[in-house]
């Protein structure tokens, strides 16, 4: 059962139980969801196993499922969807001389992504069932990633955020370098250079903001949000953070690590990269750039719109030209993340809400597509579309799964991708902060990507499953159809994809209060800039316009 259906059902059940669950509201849910999988991972080296991974994979799956249930418990027992503020707060002074505290909490922007992380990780562990090479180390790294990625969305201290941001880089590097394809060392090294190198901007911004106007540092988000940073200071921090988070999102031209990483990764790592890792960049842009630096965001928002359009068109055209299946889907992911940028650059609640929904939606759809890429490669032992043809006769269930997930990716009405992209488009084109010509031009260009997506996805399906069978492929490979485990994984992903498409409020209700608060904060920054005549050429009687870049 999917995260959102399960939590919605459980919430209704809790209401009928009354005081039976009241005591659970004081349980440290978020700390448990972070520390439990990381602590359990350190049990794995001492876990009895014969070397084939049969015992350790069951242990890892149990830990991942318990972690998922902990995050669901946090949503049910301590999270109020109508409260725009941070909830489930836990604050422990850790290194007071450095201003570092163990501060965790969740609001509407983080809770859906926390649930998504634990859900995708549990399915990734199940997807890793065939792993036989160094299974203890593999599942150890997966569980450490689980806790580390939840921490990225839950921490409420900027210096602690930097530490957790760096924590998840090491497992990804090792998962690529040890279990990747032929060029795994190159892909892993490129990944760590791009992501770790750009992270220095997060540290510099954190130190600058934490020490701003005081000798005693304070890095907590609530303190930073209340600070009266000057506009020039905000712009400097904004540029650095945009580079750091733009690498992770990724934003063109900072994207080149992603196709290489996806090109060498295994199916479970694919799921974590596409389903969770990219969303960290989008979340961080909302949390830091849009929320903590509103004056700078008012100036850079048009640039985000332009970069989003570039992402959509460039990556869609590049995906169309790819002959490698993994790289085709990787560029498709970059294209879809362009809608997140447009939504973040929008000053409307609908557009920004669409960006949040797009992150959740693409997390589910991207994980499903990359899992199917891995499953198909396990059978054909090739990623070249020129060598695949006519395998639909041998793998009919696999063809049905591919078709369903591809339709979700091309934003078929009734699926989550359609709703999220429609919200972004509608929110942006009705956003009067921007001039009408700018909205028309940007929306028209973004529509090109929407048109290209079904073309390259449907042509991909045709090349893989239709046409004349490749005799060499049929003779050399045993093309068995989808196994029950594979069908179950895709079914778990398709259920929320379709559920959100039919009833988006399953997700949007959880974050709309926080998004409205964020948009109001940014609009006030725009109004303040207009009143002080920060924008060149602005007149008092003009409608609000984001500044020209």
Image (spheres, rainbow, N blue to C red):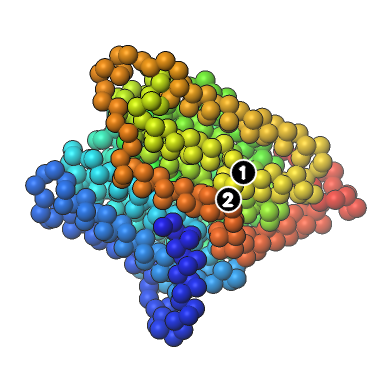
Number of marks in the image?
A: 2
Point 36% across, 64% down: residue: 69
- Percent x, y for residue 441? 76, 34
For disc 1, the marked residue is: 413
Q: Residue at the bottom extreme?
A: 19
Of residue 143 and residue 158, the one placed in the foreground of this image is 143
Q: Does residue 289 lie above or below 467 as drawn?
A: below
Question: Dot 2, crowdedness within 10 Å: few (<14), some or many (≥20)?
Answer: many
**Going by the image, does 165 lie left or right of 510?**
left
Q: Which of marks 2 and 1 is nearer the N terminus?
A: 1
Quadrant location of residue 434? top right
Which label belongs to residue 501? 2
Residue 199 visible to the viewer: no
Q: Which of 440 and 368 is in front in this view?
A: 368
Task: State the residue at coordinates (59%, 56%).
Answer: 503
Q: Residue at x 51, y 44 (%)?
A: 362
**Residue 257: where, in percent of width, then height?**
43, 32
Say which quadrant the N terminus sits in. bottom left
Q: Do the residues labelled 2 and 1 touch (CB within 8 Å)?
A: yes
320 to the left or right of 537: left
Disc 2 to disc 1, C-alpha distance: 7 Å
Dot 1 falls on a residue whose secondary structure is loop
């Amino acid at each position: 059962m999917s995260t959102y259906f399960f939590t919605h059902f459980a919430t209704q059940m809790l209401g009928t139980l009354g005081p039976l669950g009241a005591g659970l509201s004081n349980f440290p849910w978020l700390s448990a969801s972070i520390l439990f999988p990381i602590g359990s991972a350190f049990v794995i080296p001492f876990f009895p196993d014969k070397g084939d991974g049969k015992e350790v994979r069951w242990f890892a799956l149990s830990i991942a499922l318990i972690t998922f249930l902990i995050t669901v418990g946090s949503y049910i027992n301590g999270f109020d969807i109508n409260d725009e503020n941070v909830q489930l707060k836990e604050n422990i002074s850790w290194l007071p001389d450095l201003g570092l505290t163990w501060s965790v909490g969740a609001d509407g922007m983080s809770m859906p992504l926390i649930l998504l992380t634990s859900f995708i990780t549990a399915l990734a562990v199940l997807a890793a069932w065939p792993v036989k090479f160094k299974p203890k180390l593999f599942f150890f790294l997966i569980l450490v990633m689980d806790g580390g990625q939840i921490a990225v969305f839950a921490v409420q201290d900027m210096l602690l955020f930097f530490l957790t941001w760096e924590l998840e880089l090491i497992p990804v590097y090792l998962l690529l370098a040890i279990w990747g394809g032929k060029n795994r060392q190159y892909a892993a090294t490129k990944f760590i250079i791009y992501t770790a190198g750009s992270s220095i901007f997060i540290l510099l911004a954190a130190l600058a903001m934490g020490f701003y106007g005081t000798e005693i540092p304070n890095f907590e988000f609530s303190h930073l949000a209340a600070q009266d940073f000057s506009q020039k200071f905000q712009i400097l921090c904004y540029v650095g953070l945009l580079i750091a988070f733009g690498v992770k999102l990724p934003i063109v031209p900072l994207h080149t690590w992603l196709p290489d990483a996806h090109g060498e990764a295994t199916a479970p790592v694919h799921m974590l990269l596409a389903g969770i890792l990219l969303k960290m960049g989008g979340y961080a842009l909302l949390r830091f750039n849009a929320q903590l630096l509103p004056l700078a965001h008012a100036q850079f928002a048009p640039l985000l719109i332009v970069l989003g359009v570039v992402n959509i068109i460039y990556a869609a055209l590049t995906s169309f030209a790819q002959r490698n299946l993994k790289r085709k889907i990787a560029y498709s992911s970059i294209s879809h993340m362009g809608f997140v940028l447009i939504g973040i650059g929008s000053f409307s609640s609908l557009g920004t809400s669409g960006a949040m929904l797009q992150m959740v939606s693409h997390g589910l759809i991207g994980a499903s597509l990359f899992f199917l890429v891995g499953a198909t490669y396990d059978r054909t032992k090739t990623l070249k579309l020129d060598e695949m043809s006519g395998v639909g006769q041998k793998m009919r269930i696999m063809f049905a799964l591919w078709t369903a997930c591809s339709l979700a990716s091309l934003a078929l009405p009734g699926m989550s991708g359609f709703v999220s992209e429609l919200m972004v488009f509608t929110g942006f084109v009705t956003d009067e902060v921007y001039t009408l010509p700018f909205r028309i031009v940007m929306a028209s260009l973004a529509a090109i990507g929407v048109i290209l997506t079904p073309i390259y996805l449907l042509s991909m399906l045709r090349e893989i499953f239709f046409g004349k069978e490749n005799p060499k492929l049929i003779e050399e490979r045993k093309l068995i159809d989808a196994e029950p485990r594979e069908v179950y994984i895709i079914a778990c992903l398709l259920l929320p994809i379709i559920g959100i498409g039919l009833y988006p409020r399953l997700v949007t209700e959880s974050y709309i209060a926080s998004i409205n608060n964020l948009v109001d904060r940014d609009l006030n920054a725009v109004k303040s800039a207009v009143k002080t005549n920060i924008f060149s050429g602005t007149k008092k009687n003009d409608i609000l316009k984001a500044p020209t870049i």
